[in-house]
Amino acid sequence: MEQAEVHNYLRRYFYAAGAELLHTRPPNLEVQLNKTLDLELMNRPFYWHYLEKTGGEPKPLKMNLSTDMHSETNEKIHFGSPRLHQIFSSAVEKGAVTRLYEQTYQKNQTPLYPWLGLNMRISYTCHRRRDDIRSFGVQLISGETIDHFMKRLSPLPLVPAIPDYTFTMANLIKPLSAVQRIKKYLLDDIRSQKHTWADEATKRMNADLQLLDRFYEAREEEDTDYDSEKEAIQHQYQPTIQLTFINGGLFYLSKERGTLF
Amino acid sequence: MYIDIHFSTDWEEKFKKALDDEGPWSSWEMYRLAYEAEKHKAVPSFDGLVATSHLPQLSLYDHQWETARRVVEDMNGKAILADEVGLGKTIEAGLVLKEYMIRGLVKKALILAPASLVNQWAQELNEKFNIPAVPQKKSYVWERCDVVVASMDAAKRSPHRDIVLEQPYDMIIIDEAHKLKNTKTKNYAFIKSLKKRFCLLLTATPVQNRIEELFHLVSILKPGHLGDEKSFKDQYKGDQSNEDIQALVQNVMVRNRRDNTNVNWTKRHVENNHVKMSDEERAMYDAVCNLKQTVQELHGFSLTTLQREACSSKEALGVTLSNMMKKGILSEEQATPVVQAMQAVKTNAKAEQVLKQLQASSEKTIIFTEYRATQLFLQWFLSQHKIRSVPFRGGFKRSKKDWMRMLFRDHAQVMIATEAGGEGLNLQFCHHMINYDLPWNPMRVEQRIGRIHRLGQKEDVHITNYAIDNTVEQRILNLLYDKIAMFEGVIGRLDDILERYSGQELEKYVEDALDSDTEGETRVKLHHLSELMNQENKGGGQDGTGRSS
């Protein structure tokens, strides 16, 4: 993540979170936080507790950030800095679920079709790890499931309230059932794949376990560490696939089918 | 093959609640920001290091990056980091830890370091790596903090021990791991019983005396990797298997050497200062040597110890002498000539020369001595001449060590350290070193020099060795250290050399050589040793323990 990207991301985040942008020219970014953001990001529970008890006027802090690593006045921020990761987590928390409508600008009544959008991270873990970010969409009447849903959504104007001259079609598939469908689809997909990484990890695990056995077989005295060492080796290599939903929501779109995007 | 598959259901609960309550729904922009955050955080590949992209302010040497990569990719996160002193093992370990934390493979980690280094470790992990490491001071820290730095002594002691063994650590890092060479110790048993998913052992001297030490270290990391103990010992006796073992060791150990890293090292300037004893001191030294005739059971080791102490200070000699008398090794009658000679000694020729050197420059200087009594004497002696010095010993508490280091940096001209103080002390702000007396083991000399000649040292380093003419000291300096060009920092593969003395302890060899009946014999034996070392050094070829490319 380049510094310009970081700057851009932060500006968008603070704007979306309702902070007042005071100064946005790179490399600096200075914002006046609101109460919610102060509570969330500034870690000063005693101040807020005190305010609550005394009924004073809340004065949320300003945040002065800089993507210039030599800045002397502002808090330096870069891809690995704890501040950026705090903001990443905050965005994930705030952006977990949504319901949006496509703005169509039509003058005659237009139907909007219900879609479930679902983004997820698939982590392949053994003694190493790789992540895959996937994005699915399920049309909630036909059940059609399409991939790369976020990418397809990105050019569309999406608004939080139903636009004029549009009406929503009722769904046949419940959103939560669609979530289950995607889960099942993913499980089938995972089971049908070849996982060379897992084979490789299992091979290494078995080799280490064999060495361990030989080591302890040759020892005469009773040894209590054997079990914990065996467990540690299994823990080190055990192939695991972790599926985590990042966010998801309902999207009412003019598109009835995936091919229309 | 068996793969665990987990679904986390947190999000589904949130979604269900939002559907029931008709919101609240996030804006399109925040929804996208959340998705983008996860895209940025995702680790795209099993291979490579992602940590560096998180640490733009960290400048790494090639060998450090390459070491971390090898540990993660080739060694599955279990390795001995055995770089020569001063090449930045802490940085390498920090980088590996960071990599695993970013990949979500390590959440809880324990770093065990000598007490004097606990704060420094925590500070470096925080400042250089943004890893929220906490020095263990209160017992609740074990459970509440994810990354804890502690001393081995604190961790293995009750009530901590039981709590520590309960913690589900994903990674354990042990600094100065050569202290674990003895399997009979509590430390060894404690470390063995810790669950080690990923584990790094840091030491500049994986082998100090015997190849078995390496076997024990590897057994902590990967039991069975070098076979079982008996077959290892049997095998190692035959020289043929040497290369096999080196190849195996290469799979679990990274050892970078100064001469094959692209670090621009400052120079080492070495000067040997020959000291002439006063007549009284000479009489004392001779009286010690004469003990060999009067005391039948006095074996070489004790005699050399007394001789070396006589070269250091009469205070050091006095301590050992009275201990030997208490234990009945020496009778009062036998000791009398030495004691009388000691009483006549009023000055210390070596200390006076050191004083002259210190008075001639105002440079910060660290003085190393083997003996605590000498350390105390020197501190007193220097203070008589208005030179401020601070002591440093292994036995000091962590806070005291930090304090002494700071006093030395900010206020005192001199630090006087004993051998135990040698490890893990970083003194890049000082570039003058005095070896008031010399250890018998070349590895320990290298460790001393490493205190000041390490990464971050910007000045050339000046080392002055003091040796008294016509004594054991001069012999070891001339016959061994000068020959292997110890101090010029070109010792290269000393540890490999030591490995080839399978069983034979180097220190014992030197003792034996010095204890020979004739001077000629001593000369021949030490010459033989230095030739062997030089030969290995030049010949090289089979570098058993890996280097970065």
Image (cartoon, rainbow, N blue to C red):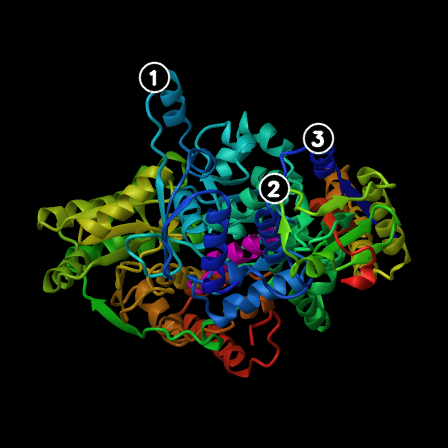
Q: Do tags 3 and 2 sit on the same chain?
A: yes
- The answer to whether mark 3 and mark 2 are in CB contact below 8 A is no
Q: Three-letter amino acid code at disc 3?
A: Lys
**Separation of marks 2 and 1 at Cα, in angstroms:** 33 Å
- Whether residue B136 is situated above or below residue B62 in the rendered picture: above
Q: Secondary structure at mark 2?
A: loop
Q: Do tags 2 and 1 sit on the same chain?
A: no
Residue under circle 3?
A: B17
Chain assignment, label 3: B
For residue B502, say whether it is visible: no
Q: Which disc, if any, is residue B26?
A: 2
**Separation of marks 1 and 3 at Cα, in angstroms:** 34 Å
**Separation of marks 3 and 2 at Cα, in angstroms:** 14 Å
Who is closer to the viewer here, B466 or B59? Answer: B59
Q: Residue placed at 28% from the left, 42% from the top?
A: B403
Part of the protein shown in magenta: B86-102
- Whether residue B229 is situated above or below residue B497 in the rendered picture: above
Neighbourhood count class around disc 1 (C-alpha, 10 Å): few under 14, some 14–19, many 20 upward: few
Q: Where in the figure is residue A9, as x and y percent of width and height?
A: 50, 56
Chain assignment, label 1: A
- Whether residue B486 is situated above or below residue B350 in the rendered picture: below
Who is closer to the viewer here, B302 or B112? Answer: B112
Q: Image check: B64 left or right of B464? A: right
Q: Where in the figure is residue B10, as x and y percent of width and height?
A: 70, 36
Q: Image check: B58 left or right of A228? A: left
Q: Three-letter amino acid code at disc 2?
A: Ser
Q: Three-letter amino acid code at disc 1?
A: Thr
- The answer to whether mark 2 and mark 1 are in CB contact below 8 A is no
Which numbered mark, 2 or 1, is in the foreground of this view? 2
Residue under circle 1?
A: A54
- Whether residue A223 is situated above or below residue B84 in the rendered picture: above
Chain assignment, label 2: B
